[in-house]
Image: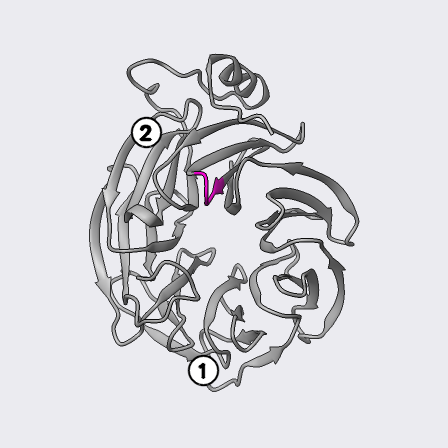
Amino acid sequence: MTDHVITRRNAMKLAGVAGLPLPLATQAPAGGDVLAVVEKGDRRLAFFDAGSGKRLAELVLGDYPHELVADRERKFAYVGHYGVEFSSVVGPGASAVFVVDLRARSLVRTIEIAPYNRIHGVGMDASDRLYVLSEEKATLLGFDTPINAPSRAVNTGGIKTHLFSLTRDGQRAYVTGLLSHTVSLVRPYDAAIAPVLVTPGQLPESSCLSTDERTLFVGARRTPAVVAVDARTMRVRGEMKVAGDPLRVYTVSDDQLLVTDLANKTISMISTGFRPIWTVSVPGQPSAASFHPTKPIAYVSLLDTQKVAVLDLDHRQIVGTFATLRQPDASVLIPG
């Protein structure tokens, strides 16, 4: 497909669709939306003007940072230090969480959490409490405020635990195990309750909860399928077979899910009842996506082509791309 770099013409399309600013030759508009992107292949968290794609700043972190999460007010972000390139890489990885001031674009501190290592999945509940996942130790760690050290830990029951979804109150977490091919329901605040496991398919990696938190949707990469699991009973309700590799699954609305297909280089919208809605091709392997909080825009990192694609969800098209360093991954939008 044709690559739509964010030129003045494409920026005008963005402005028409979502009110995004036009690119300037020298400096990004003051107070504009900013996208923070983990560039895991170059050890960085980079900041971009979300309208023009202009690179504004960068922070050098440790080798191979992966996932990040931000608090509700977008003041601070927390980046898991995974320490290896991919989940298939053998090694101890790293054991830390980077705390970033998103407004000052500075590294505030590094929280060392050894012996918990290969820190990958990160999340926050509605009370801005932080949770991080040790892939190697199969342990979910919880942090009270101030966020300086783990306050609790629960065994997840899975093997090679990679990502998790969290209820808004933080009382339930759903953890995917790449090697055990499981999803575990754990109680972050009651380690005495044993994990409840289900096998939704082969290589479950990402998941998301429905807006009413009654259904968990899981991307089973090697099945390949998107699978619906009852979030209380942990029983499989149904599945939608897909042709490629459903790397990430996101809840977009009460009845819509966004799926990134790494193998076919596509992004699809499907209904929560597993009806196809639309599919668009993208100029690279779509890994992680983030969403504008008030506009119908998704920002999709393209792992192999070092770009972020800007997806207009209403018009179902890519309206621009901008360049990053190597292996862009998780991102978060900071409203201006």
Q: Is residue 237 visible?
A: yes
Given residues 156 and 304, the one toward you in this image is 304
Secondary structure state at the residue bearing disc 2: strand
Q: Position of residue 272 (x, y in %)?
A: 73, 53
Given residues 226 and 262, the one toward you in this image is 262
Given residues 336 and 203, the one toward you in this image is 203
Secondary structure state at the residue bearing disc 1: loop
Q: Residue at x 35, y 75 (%)?
A: 152
Q: Name the kind of residue labelled 2 in the image.
A: Arg
Select label 1 or label 2 by which is in front: 2
Q: Position of residue 1 (x, y in %)?
A: 60, 29
Q: Is residue 131 visible?
A: no
Q: Name the kind of residue labelled 1 in the image.
A: Ala
61, above or below 147, in the image: above
Determine the main secondary structure of the stretch shown in magenta: loop
Residue denoted by label 1: 191
Q: Mark number for residue 55?
A: 2
What span is colored magenta in the figure?
301-305
Q: Mark number for residue 19?
A: none
Q: Is residue 216 left or right of residue 237?
A: left
The chosen color scheme is: one colour
Q: Position of residue 222 (x, y in %)?
A: 63, 64
Q: Residue at x 35, y 50 (%)?
A: 40
Q: Residue at x 46, y 74 (%)?
A: 160
Q: Position of residue 126 (x, y in %)?
A: 47, 55
Residue 205 falls within the magenta-colored stretch? no
11, above or below 44, in the image: above
